[in-house]
Image: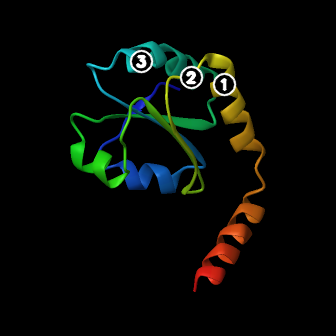
């Protein structure tokens, strides 16, 4: 599956309406972003069960600010609408594959239970 362009209009629906979503925050002027792009694209071709989205931080400034993006490229991993991973930096293919594998392996019932526990403790 090829990568999809995400914008403020489709970001929320994409992240909450699909199982696993990886998001690459990038800009055209960013050298590390250009280095990471082929790795991200190649992974998108190998994992049909994952949505790979790209957000141009220059075009989507408001969305970038809402997401707290301070450095690019930044990779975010969502599953069932829950943000599980968010780190800046271009990853080598093996590291990206490791993240995808870990996100797929997660017991989401346990993740949701942990979130509920943390929210209850904060209340």
Which one is nearer the viewer's eye here, 59 or 80?
59
Q: Is residue 114 above or below residue 8?
A: below
Q: Are marks 2 and 3 in contact (CB under 8 Å)?
A: no
Q: Are marks 2 and 1 in contact (CB under 8 Å)?
A: yes
Residue at figure coordinates x 59%, y 80% from the top left: 122
On the image, the x and y values in percent for residue 65 come to: 29, 50
Give the quadrant of residue 48. Answer: top right
Distance CA(mark 3)–CA(mark 1): 15 Å
Report the disc number at residue 91. Answer: 2
- Element type at marker 1? helix
- Element type at marker 3? helix
Report the disc number at residue 95. Answer: 1
Quadrant of the drawing holding the C terminus? bottom right
- Mark 1 crowd level (few <14, some 14–19, many ≥20, 10 Å Cα): few
Q: Is residue 93 left or right of residue 36?
A: right
Query: Can you identify the residue that label 3 sits on?
Result: 32
On the image, the x and y values in percent for residue 10 come to: 34, 49
Whether residue 109 appears in this view of the structure is yes
On the image, the x and y values in percent for residue 21 come to: 54, 43
């Amino acid at each position: 599956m090829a990568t999809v362009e995400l914008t403020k209009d489709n970001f929320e629906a994409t992240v909450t309406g699909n199982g696993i979503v990886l998001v690459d925050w990038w800009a055209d002027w960013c050298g590390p972003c250009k280095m990471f792009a082929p790795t991200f694209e190649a992974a998108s071709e190998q994992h049909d069960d994952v949505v790979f989205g790209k957000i141009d931080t220059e075009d989507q400034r408001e969305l970038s600010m809402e997401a707290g993006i301070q450095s690019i490229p930044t990779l975010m991993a969502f599953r069932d609408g829950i943000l599980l991973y968010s780190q800046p930096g271009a990853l080598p293919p093996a590291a990206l594959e490791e993240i995808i594998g870990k996100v797929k392996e997660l017991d989401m019932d346990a993740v949701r239970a942990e979130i509920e526990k943390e929210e209850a403790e904060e209340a």
